Amino acid sequence: MLFAPSRLPLQRFPPRRLRLVPGSPMASTLAILRPSAPAPLAGPRGRVAAPATARVALSSRSRYLSARVSLGSEVAVGDALFADYKPTTAFLFPGQGAQTVGMGAEAQSVPAAAKLFNQANDILGYDLLDLCTNGPKEKLDSTVISQPAIYVTSLAAVEVLRARDGGKDVINSVDVTCGLSLGEYTALAFAGAFSFEDGLKLVKLRGEAMQDASDAANSAMVSVIGLDSEKVQELCDAANEEVDEKERVQIANFLCPGNYAVSGGVKGIEVVEAKAKSFKARMTVRLAVAGAFHTSFMQPAVSRLESALAATEIRTPRIPVISNVDAHPHSDPDTIKQILARQVTSPVQWETTVKTLMGKGLDKSYELGPGKVIAGILKRINKGAVIENIGA
């Protein structure tokens, strides 16, 4: 369920600097900051050729530690193929933080879904289903395990839906997809941009690279609750006035109104927590994640992702897949590769993505995978949003 400050039994300021236990209900909402389908997942629509990508300059929303998707001397923000997409039905996929012990159990009653877990075991070298269904929780919550677990469980949820009465019609009606951080890989797999197996290999490496980058620096993340994004940026600017450059912070996740995650050096995060009261924030919640995701602290992971992506066959998605980096769909495979490599150092533009989809006429959404975090976010942005959860 979406984190709703007015309903939490937590005292108002002076706030507690909470430290969430990974996998807890609050953590599942607040820590979802990060992040190829088999033939059935690609759906019935054929591929289309990718035209040249349109490129324009894209300004950063953060003053410090900002990351851009550099494509030569320009930044891609969309292309002609998907420029005028008009969404009606969307598949939305969760990111890290949505994991919970017991996920994947329902999928075992659907052969096509169960097969994905068997394939995953061969690729990962361990029993993923056992970790998903039995834990231990601490291991499932780790970056290197939770990312593959969520990816596989989310695509298994597609097969669970396919097996239901009317499920195939729902899948065939989907004309746009996106995922929160890690979930962008799941969305690309569903859209046929790469195979289930290739996507899982990428996600496995992504989790490992992000963990290694986190281990190399003393960094952290905190959610600031009760402020709009402009006020959170002012808070970050104020904190950055008091710390060294290596400790500076930025907004890393534009989640939904009143809930924005800040990443950076531990000292910078501590200043944000200390100053939040003076900026009229309701509270701050330290996130139980490995490090400062979606900032330049993750730069060591980029080269590893670039190498893996260069060796991966990526095709033009059959439907628009909205990028976390710029809230635009991209059709050119090379552009997609470069965006995915830079995604780990770029702020997640989820709020913009959701508002854009709704503004373009989105009628209904489906959240596929563990948890109901995305459903809560949509309701927070638009109370009238129609969304259905499909678990596995």
Image (cartoon, rainbow, N blue to C red):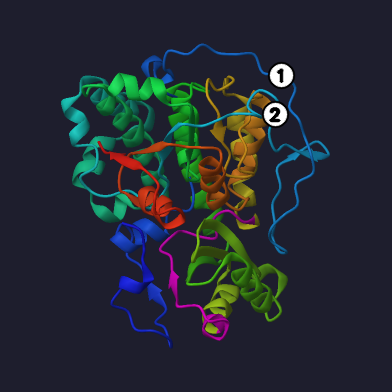
Q: Which mark is residue 51?
A: 1
Q: Which mark is residue 79?
A: 2
Residue type, mark 1 in image: Pro
Residue 8 at x, y percent in the picture: 31, 73
**Distance Cα–Cα, label 2 vs label 1:** 8 Å
Looking at the image, which residue sits at the far bottom?
14
Residue type, mark 2 in image: Asp
Q: Callout 1: few (<14), some (14-19), or many (20+) C-alpha neighbours within 10 Å?
A: few
- Numbered disc 1: secondary structure: loop
Residue at 52% x, 63% y is: 260
Q: Quadrant of residue 10?
A: bottom left
Residue 249 at x, y percent in the picture: 63, 68
312 over 240 or under it: above or below? above
Q: Which mark is residue 116?
A: none
* Drawn side of residue 6 relative to residue 361, left or right: left
Residue 85 at x, y percent in the picture: 59, 29
* Residue 216 in sight here: no
Q: Which residues are magenta?
A: 275-295
- Numbered disc 2: secondary structure: loop
Q: Quadrant of residue 15?
A: bottom left
Residue at 48% x, 24% y is: 191
The N terminus sits in image quarter: bottom left
The C terminus sits in image quarter: top left
49 over 62 or under it: above or below? above
Residue at 62% x, 57% y is: 297
